[in-house]
Amino acid sequence: MSTAPTSALECFQNPNPERDYEIRFECPEFTCLCPKTGQPDFATIRIRYVPDGSCVELKSLKLYLWSFRQEGHFHEAVTNSILTDLVTLLAPRRMTVEGDFLVRGGIHTVVEVSHP
């Protein structure tokens, strides 16, 4: 597997699909660019999900999140995009993605989106 940022996510078969259990990730080094100013935005991305048939492979998740570093995104759009991509890949029973963005212009923003 490459170490270059990529939008390609990978998964593996859930080892215990017969039971509900929650997987949580905290990604404290998320970066994207403000689409208005081009300045970097920093955030912690938190992902919680109950898998069904598949689980996300962690290195691919890391490289996927890195792929946003040179792209301009509004906080709301990037958080929703992450949820959409993960739900498309995994079809989880439940999933929540939270983007907890550092203060910009005196405003601290938290965006939380869920499936279903």
Image (spheres, rainbow, N blue to C red):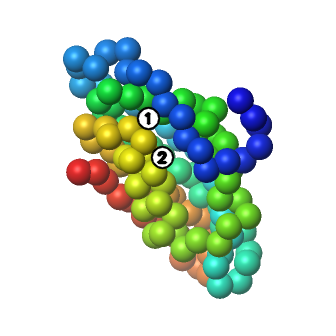
**Which of the 4 image quadrants contains residue 103?**
bottom right
Residue type pointed to by label 2 = Arg
Pointers 2 and 1 in contact (C-beta within 8 Å): yes
Task: Return the residue nearer the eye: 50 or 111.
Answer: 50
Residue 91 position within the rendered picture, expressed as x and y whole percent measured from the top left: 32, 40
Residue type pointed to by label 1 = Arg
**Which of the 4 image quadrants contains residue 111?**
bottom left
The residue labelled by disc 1 is 24
Q: Secondary structure at mark 2?
A: strand
Task: Return the residue nearer the eye: 87 or 105.
Answer: 87
Task: Return the residue nearer the eye: 77 or 10.
Answer: 10
Q: Is residue 43 visible?
A: yes
Residue at coordinates 23% horizontally, 51% vertically from top-left? Answer: 116
Q: Secondary structure at mark 1?
A: strand
Residue 61 position within the rendered picture, expressed as x and y whole percent measured from the top left: 58, 40
**Image height check: is 1 above or below 5?**
above
Is residue 30 left or right of 112 when viewed as pictured?
right
The residue labelled by disc 2 is 46
Q: Quadrant of the N terminus?
A: top right
Residue at coordinates 43% horizontally, 62% vertically from top-left? Answer: 80
Is residue 94 left or right of 104 when viewed as pictured?
left
